[in-house]
């Protein structure tokens, strides 16, 4: 049964995978205000299945963000918006910068900082919202021994642990992509294994919907 009720506001926050060209300063309203990714997909599915509920969807993704960036804008982009539901997917840039910018350690968000920050944000936010959905970061790579995939899995475990501690809904997007990768090469979904095609965004959107239905 769908848990999002009549007139409730659903806010998505994250990085470029959430952003997807959404309107600024607030991604809300007619297409393409929500961007061209999984947030629009979820909004369309909710509208189609539950048109009477008038669920309000807001996109606050910002390309390039890490969890450190989310913390810096949390008051304005989450707490001040007063959502009923909050969906958080962050972490790929926290990991990626350790691989594509190894000489710039100031851009690296290590697992300890990541887990602590996520826990802090959940602690201050949980009392202010009806429900939270935590989604794992993902890397569209089938080989678990790939160094970036192995690190992403570590950050994903931190998300799962935070979800269990704070009693949130949980969506394992990495597991959702691995199901698809049993039948498809990663480049079919994302040329850089991070930014998905429309098909990949549907995988993310379905993982979210499964978590709230």
Image: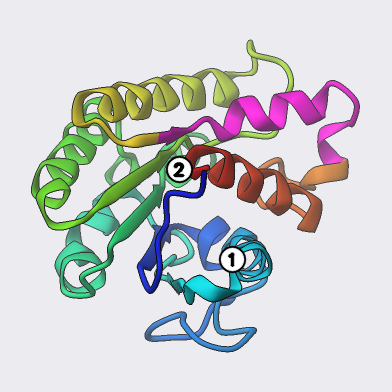
- The secondary element bearing badge 1 is classed as loop
Instruction: Find the distance from the CA under tag 2 to the CA under tag 1.
Output: 40 Å
- The secondary element bearing badge 2 is classed as helix
Circle 1 residue: 50
Position in image of residue 29 (x %, y %): 51, 87
83 in relation to 162, above or below: below
Does the magenta stretch mainly form a helix, a strand or a loop?
helix
Foreground residue among 2 and 168: 2
Circle 2 residue: 97
Position in image of residue 26 (x %, y %): 39, 83
Assess whether residue 184 is covered by the magenta stretch.
yes
Foreground residue among 163 and 182: 163
Q: Which mark is residue 99?
A: none
Foreground residue among 167 and 18: 167
Q: Tell me which corner region of the image, top left, top right, bottom left or bottom right, holds residue 38.
A: bottom right
Q: Which residues are magenta?
A: 170-187
Q: Nearer the viewer, mark 2 or mark 1?
A: 1
Tell me, yes or no, if residue 141 can be seen here: no
Mark 2, residues whose alpha carbon is within 10 Å: few (<14), some, or many (≥20)?
Answer: some
Name the residue located 65 percent from the left edge and 62 percent from the top edge: 49
Position in image of residue 5 (x %, y %): 40, 61
């Amino acid at each position: 049964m769908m848990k999002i009720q009549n007139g409730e506001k659903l806010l998505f926050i994250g990085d470029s995978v959430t952003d997807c060209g959404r309107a600024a300063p607030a991604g809300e309203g007619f297409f393409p205000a929500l961007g061209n990714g999984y947030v629009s997909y979820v909004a369309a599915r909710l509208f189609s299945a539950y048109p009477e509920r008038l669920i309000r969807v807001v996109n606050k993704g910002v390309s390039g963000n890490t969890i450190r960036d989310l913390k810096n804008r949390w008051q304005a982009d989450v707490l001040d918006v007063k959502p009923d539901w909050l969906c958080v997917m962050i972490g790929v840039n926290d990991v990626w910068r350790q691989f594509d910018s190894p000489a710039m350690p100031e851009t690296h968000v290590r697992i300890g900082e990541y887990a602590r920050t996520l826990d802090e944000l959940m602690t201050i936010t949980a009392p202010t919202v009806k429900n939270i959905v935590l989604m794992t970061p993902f890397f569209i790579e089938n080989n678990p021994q790939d160094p970036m995939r192995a690190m992403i899995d570590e950050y994903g475990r931190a998300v799962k642990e935070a979800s269990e501690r704070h009693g949130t809904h949980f969506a394992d997007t990495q597991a959702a992509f691995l199901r698809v990768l049993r039948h498809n090469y990663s480049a079919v979904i994302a040329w850089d294994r991070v930014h998905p095609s429309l098909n990949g965004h549907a995988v993310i959107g379905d993982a979210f919907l499964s978590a709230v239905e």
